Amino acid sequence: MKSLTHRVQQFLDRPLPDEIALNYEPDSLTEMFLRTYATGAPTDKGFVQMGKICLTEIDQTIAQLNTEAGREYFIECRKLVTEVLQEVM
């Protein structure tokens, strides 16, 4: 099985579904959270808090999406954020 770091990096590198690409924010909190983890940067309580905020934002985003591809993308994103939080807490 691939490491969590590798899976996060693959997720960040893959093409975005069309619905997501339309409103893509490269410096979103969730992307910053995942990139910080993928680069091996040190984590602290602030990082954990950022991840918890990301989960709330992801849940709100999933509820607003219109396509299955968009929902699947954010469901996978949520899974990765959850796994990162479990690892660093």
Image: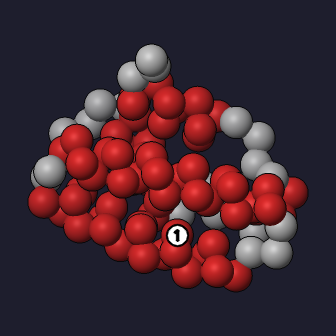
Please, what secondary structure does the residue beneath circle 1 have?
Answer: helix
Vertical relation: 26 (above or below) 63 = above
Q: Quadrant of residue 11?
A: top right
Question: Residue at the spot x=57%, y=50% of the render?
Answer: 76
Whether residue 13 is visible here, answered yes or no, is yes
Residue 31, position in %: x, y? 50, 53
Vertical relation: 9 (above or below) 17 = above
Residue that numbered label 1 is attached to = 58
Question: Residue at the spot x=14%, y=51% of the render?
Answer: 89
11 with respect to 57 (left or right): right
Question: Residue at the spot x=75%, y=69% of the render?
Answer: 23
Vertical relation: 39 (above or below) 69 = above
Q: Residues within 10 Å of mark 1 (few under 14, many from 20)?
A: some
Question: Disc 1 residue type?
Answer: Ile
Work out whether residue 24 or residue 68 is closer to the camera in this orientation and state it: 68
Q: Quadrant of residue 19?
A: bottom right
88 with respect to 4 (left or right): left
74 with respect to 50 (left or right): right
Question: Residue at the spot x=41%, y=68% of the render?
Answer: 55
Location of the N terminus by quadrant is top left
40 with respect to 3 (left or right): left
Residue 5, position in %: x, y? 40, 29
Whether residue 27 is visible here, answered yes or no, is no
